[in-house]
Image (cartoon, grey):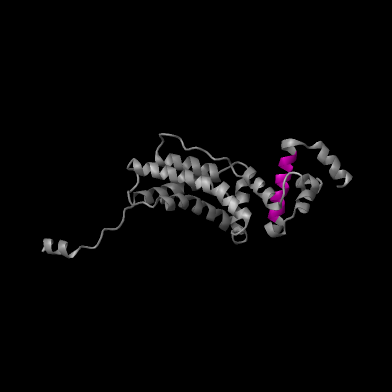
Amino acid sequence: MSSQSETVSRRRRGAVLEAAIYRAVREELTEVGYSAASLDGIARRARIGRMSLYRRWNSKAELVLDAMRDAIPRQTDPPRGAALGEQLRTILEAMFVVPDGLPVLVLHLVASQTAELRTTPLGEAMRREVFAPRLAILETIFAEAQERGEIATDANIPLLARTGPAVLFQQILLTGEQPSALDVATVISQILLPACAAVAPPSPPTAQTDSANG
């Protein structure tokens, strides 16, 4: 470790040093991608010695996952007793509408490298720890609304839960722009709520029905 890195490392401790490391991770991923990212490169960006990273993280995947956890907002519980649209708004805004836009950067990186991460331990951990819990909350919201009679009994709950995040995620991937509160409201009012009210098309008439009508 260089004397300059050693001095900087001594000055920064705890949350301050951790924030600098996570920022360096995001910069490294943005510029070179996950495959080419390295702990050495991250250490140089954070201006610390690489042993400072190895003492805490056993691998690049572990460090990147922690940086992702840090950037993406914590899970938010839906307001109890609120209407379906309000519950959806609370969860989707917490996921996609944030002041500093960091989660959007993270999500864009994930989207742009989906094929690369799909079969890696990091990709599996992100699905399990970052995305699956949030989808589970949305599924619960839709399922409870279905029990209250607000959603058609034939509605596909898992598909409804994935649709909102998929549309907003796609906006990030295609435009690189963070969804706004208006974008979230539009997805809810024009896509999710109409889909909840949809019912299966009527079955074709049977021979017995035709005979009765005749």
Q: Position of residue 124 (x, y in %)?
A: 58, 54
- Magenta stretch: residue 22 in it? yes
Q: Is 76 on the left or on the right of 56, as rendered? A: left
Q: Is residue 139 visible?
A: yes
Is most of the magenta stretch helix, strand or loop? helix
The residue range painted magenta reads 17-30
Q: Say which of 8 and 128 sits in front.
A: 128
Q: Is residue 205 above or below residue 109?
A: below
Q: Say which of 170 and 207 sits in front.
A: 207
**Residue at image coords 43%, 42%:** 141
Q: Is residue 109 visible?
A: no
Q: Is 91 on the left or on the right of 51, as rendered? A: left
Q: Position of residue 129 (x, y in %)?
A: 57, 47
Q: Residue furthest right?
A: 3
Q: Is 182 on the left or on the right of 25, as rendered? A: left
Query: For the C terminus, which image quadrant?
Result: bottom left
Q: Position of residue 27 (x, y in %)?
A: 71, 51
Q: Is 11 on the left or on the right of 36, as rendered? A: right
**Residue at image coords 50%, 42%:** 91
- Magenta stretch: residue 175 in it? no
**Residue at image coords 17%, 65%:** 207
Q: How many marks?
A: 0
Q: Is residue 170 above or below residue 95?
A: below
